[in-house]
Image (spheres, rainbow, N blue to C red):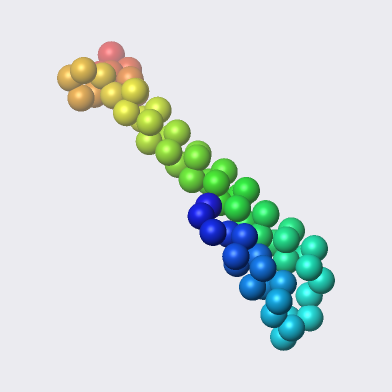
Amino acid sequence: MENWQSVLFVMNRNNSTKRQPYNVAILLMSWIFLGNFILLNLFLAILLDAFLVDEDGMSEEEIEELR
């Protein structure tokens, strides 16, 4: 998330792509939003998995299998 504005300005100044400035902005914003969404979901999955492990190191699914 740091310094993405400078990437946007460099891509807008690049004449070899022949893109409209709003296309570049849409591309970068979608990349940022999707990337953050995926990273947030991965972090939450790891966090939730840590909470599902019982004190003796067994998850709730493993306890149900033993019953």
Residue 5 location, x and y as percent? 62, 60
Residue 34 location, x and y as percent? 61, 50
Q: For the view shown, which residue lies furthest in the bottom direction?
A: 16
When the figure is inspected, residue 13 is found, relative to residue 53, above or below; the finding is below
Q: Quadrant of residue 25?
A: bottom right
Query: How many numbered marks are there?
Result: 0
User: Could you tell me which residue is drawn at 54 percent across and 59 percent down?
Assistant: 3
Q: In which quarter of the image is the C terminus?
A: top left
Q: Horizontally, is 52 left or right of 8 in the view?
A: left
Residue 6 location, x and y as percent? 60, 65
Return the residue nearer the eye: 51 or 6: 6
Return the residue nearer the eye: 66 or 19: 19
Q: Horizontally, is 38 left or right of 28 in the view?
A: left
Return the residue nearer the eye: 64 or 52: 52
Residue 65 visible here: no
Q: Quadrant of residue 47?
A: top left
Q: Horizontally, is 59 left or right of 41 in the view?
A: left
When the figure is inspected, residue 58 is found, relative to residue 40, above or below; the finding is above
Residue 28 location, x and y as percent? 66, 60
Q: In which quarter of the image is residue 12?
A: bottom right
User: Could you tell me which residue is drawn at 20 percent across and 25 percent down?
Assistant: 57
Residue 63 visible here: yes
Q: Horizontally, is 14 left or right of 2 in the view?
A: right
User: Could you tell me which residue is drawn at 45 percent across and 41 percent down?
Assistant: 42
When the figure is inspected, residue 60 is found, relative to residue 39, above or below; the finding is above
Q: For the view shown, which residue lies furthest in the left direction?
A: 56
When the figure is inspected, residue 15 is found, relative to residue 3, above or below; the finding is below
